Amino acid sequence: MVKPSYFLGNKGQLSLYVAFAGFLFLALGLSWVYLKDQRAFGGLNLPFLSFLQPTKTIDTRNWKEFKVDQNLRVYYPPDWLVVEGQYISQYSFTPGKHSNDIYNAISGQVITTQIQTSYANEDWFNRVYNAKKEDIIINEYQPNDQSLSKFTTVESVKTLKGDEFVVFKNLKFPNNLYAYLLLPGPQIYIFTLGNYDQTGQDYFHQIISTAKAN
């Protein structure tokens, strides 16, 4: 004779399986909604789901050349603009005119002065490049100087040529995004992305990744 406890045990296991399947289905459903439209979560950032997001790739084969200076060039989308020979921008704008409009304007220049007091420029670059994402980066030699900017690293990557560059934020200027590009020498360039949105941030990465030294 089969004991009643046998059926109760099987019933309990079945309930557990059903509950687990329901939880898994709900989790997958919420993950799908999040990846399709992060705004459904109020813009909440969920880093543990980032591995599910496909890597964004942009075809750069028909991009145009932009000379940052006589020693460096990058490439930009053919439907973007060059303003005064100094900026690449997705939308037209007037340099020096302040506005809340989205321009996705990018400029770059070589750094010829010391970036941070008490740091060699390459050491400061490495400090920002090697920082964990969203960690607050300060000048450790002047930690109490409130006049100095604080930074956070967005991503540390390499150009198509293998040169390191790091995208970061200066917390004093939330409407801008910045990047250091380290070239042999060492020589460091700084790029600025002004009044940007997510599209601008994606292209900022891609444009700098095309950088080629002469």
Image (spheres, rainbow, N blue to C red):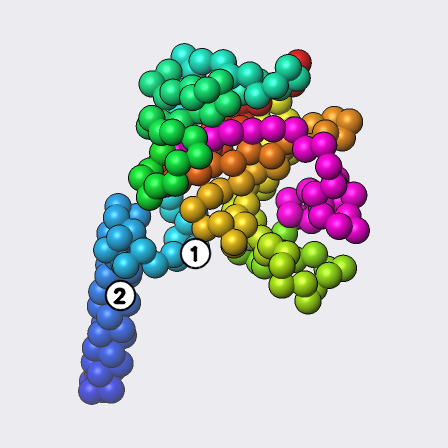
Could you tell me residue 165's position as x and y percent? 61, 35
Span of residues in magenta: 104-130
Mark drawn on residue 134: none
With respect to residue 50, does 83 lie above or below?
above
Q: Does residue 167 appear in this view? A: yes
Left or right: where does residue 138 sit relative to residue 206?
Answer: right
Q: Residue at x 47, y 36 (%)?
A: 193
Q: Does 23 sit above or below residue 120? A: below
In the foreground, 187 or 95 = 95
On residue 48, the disc is 1
Rendered residue at 39%/57% (across/down): 46
Q: Is residue 65 left or right of residue 14?
A: right
**Which residue is located at x 28 percent, y 59 percent?**
42
Extreme residue in the front direction: 97
Mark 1 secondary-structure assignment: helix
Q: What residue would you read off at disc 2?
A: 23
Q: Residues within 10 Å of mark 1 (few under 14, many from 20)?
A: few
- The answer to the question of whether label 2 and label 1 lie on touching residues, with beta carbons closer than 8 A, is no
The three-letter code of the residue at mark 2 reads Phe
The amino acid on which the numbered mark 1 sits, given as a three-letter code, is Phe
Q: CA distance from mark 2 to mark 1?
A: 17 Å
Task: Tell me where residue 152 appears, x and y as whole percent.
Answer: 56, 53
Q: Is residue 126 magenta?
A: yes
**In which quadrant will I find the N terminus?**
bottom left
Locate residue 213, reporting x and y percent. Answer: 65, 18
Q: Helix, strand, or loop for circle 2?
A: helix
Q: Nearer the viewer, residue 40 or 52?
A: 40
* Mark before the other along the chain sequence, 2 or 1: 2
- Residue 110, x across and y down, in percent: 65, 29
Q: In front: 96, or 136? A: 96
Q: Which quadrant of the figure contains the C terminus?
A: top right
